[in-house]
Amino acid sequence: MSKTITAGQAKQWLDEGGEIAFLDVREHGQYGEAHPFFVVSVPYSRLELDAERLVPRKSVPVVLLDDGDGVAERAATRLKALGYGQVHVLRGGVAAWKAEGYGMFQGVHLPSKTFGELVEHAYHTPRLQAPELAAMQARGEAVVVLDGRPLDEFRKMNIPGAVCCPNGELALRVHALVPDDTTPVVVNCAGRTRSIIGAQTLINIGIPNPVYALENGTQGWYLSDLALEHGNDRRYPQVDAAEPALQARRDKARELAGRHGVADVDAATLAGWMRQADRTTFLLDVRTGEEFAAGTLPGAQHAPGGQLLQGTDLYVGVKGARLVVTDDDGVRARVVASWLAQMGREIHVLPAAEWARARAELPAPVPATAVPGLPVIGPGELAGMVAAGEVQILDVRASMAYRQAHIAGARWAIRPRMAGQARAGTLVLVAANAELAALAAGELPDEIRAGARALIAPVAQWREAGLAVEATPDTPSDADCIDFLFFVHDRHDGNKEAARRYLAWETGLIGQLDARERGAYRISP
């Protein structure tokens, strides 16, 4: 049995400000329907694949939350096998948390989403309603619309005429996107958070143009019965590192970071921090994916600046940890750091001038523990097994993928509920990768797991091999789809009521905070 902890003790640890990894090991849908404010989602179905990135120091106190159904106990066993030494299970799970009267929140990325709402209240960020922007465009007025989301989200839908420039890139690239000092600039996202943070970023770095957040983003546009565009690739331009005006942007960024108490760190100090046994330090490269892939620093995690602010819990799983952000231009990291400081994080910047020394002095990253995958078979081999009637198939892909298309006769399964799912005999698990298949199979008795195989192939290849494929829009049932968050899930697919619910959820977040949760922020206009 693992060490247990009461909900009251867990809340005390969270409020004290020391390091703690508070992990919700329920599946994504369960987590998104109701969870504590500062918990980080690490679903048991992929625990070993994510834990070491989110919680790199294995002596940090870890508290695991479940539905009181034993999943946290199983997760604790897995984490101990990875070397984590201070693992605790929250006794009674979410029911115990609620019984103490502590808040439970719907949705995802709560600390970041709430931060956006607090920023708007504190800074009085100017906003523009969708009909106002549409009227400006219809009159032919000059206006620049910048979409603060990544390109993959931008492609799904965008405001007509908008250009994709993720929030983390705005301070560096806005000057190449705006023709003069007087043209209004409107920043949007799909909802509210990135619209607010993007617009306020431009105001904070001092661009002279009128700047507005598009109220409620693309959802506000749609709710106003205005047409969105789809499938566009318009994006920010590249920046010449030798551009004379770049130094002025660096100076602005340095001033902004300093205003919020952000200090630089040198390579030698950072190297010492990364070796420290009693503190956790995250080194976060906030540049674009292409830049990160071309070369980064030892131990750095890719965390594009806009997305880091939008969902800090996707990159950092330890509350109270030390964060170091870096870039190679002297602008982006300092602007991102100015916001992280106001989120209450201990934050430092490694300047580009320290990169050469950092490459020499930073410790080599500890390789992630390998998760052995199941042996993989192809669709043709599986088709032969099906024809011979000698195979049982479990599909451990996402529940929505199963509903859309699965091999006839396959049953949907998910790791925390694998018990009793398979009988003795030949077993094939259909999965997104062999590692996820192996994690799911690890829940089965040894004699069943020993001969299990994985099928890792797209649906088109199943059909080509002659496998029968079917769709079941209602199976598994909504109640069984614990990996899928139904909460306003169709807000971008024509459901106006879902969009309204989502926007009401965002604007209502502040009112749900207790004093300690709100006190974690240090917003200072």
Image (cartoon, rainbow, N blue to C red):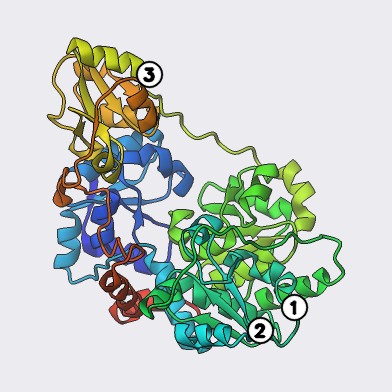
- Dot 2 corresponds to which residue? 142
**What is the CA distance from the residue labelled 2 to the residue labelled 1?**
10 Å
Residue 323 located left or right of residue 96:
right
Q: Circle 2 sits in a helix, a strand or a loop, which is it?
A: loop
Where residue 498 appears, x then y in whole percent? 27, 69
Quadrant position of the N terminus in the picture = top left
Pair 2/1: label in front:
2
User: Is residue 419 visible in this depiction of the protein?
Assistant: yes
Q: How many marks?
A: 3
Quadrant position of the C terminus in the picture = bottom right
Are discs 2 and 1 less than 8 Å apart at CB?
A: yes
Q: Which residue does the image show at 64% across and 65% down from the upper left?
A: 169
User: Is residue 525 visible in this depiction of the protein?
Assistant: no
Above or below residue 308? Residue 189 is below
CA neighbours of label 3 inside 10 A, class few (<14), some (14 to 19), many (20+): some
- Dot 1 corresponds to which residue? 179
The type of residue carrying mark 1 is Pro
**What is the CA distance from the residue labelled 3 to the residue labelled 1?**
55 Å
Residue 143 located left or right of residue 437:
right
CA neighbours of label 2 inside 10 A, class few (<14), some (14 to 19), many (20+): few
- Dot 3 corresponds to which residue? 378
Between disc 2 and disc 3, whose residue precedes?
2
Q: Circle 3 sits in a helix, a strand or a loop, which is it?
A: loop
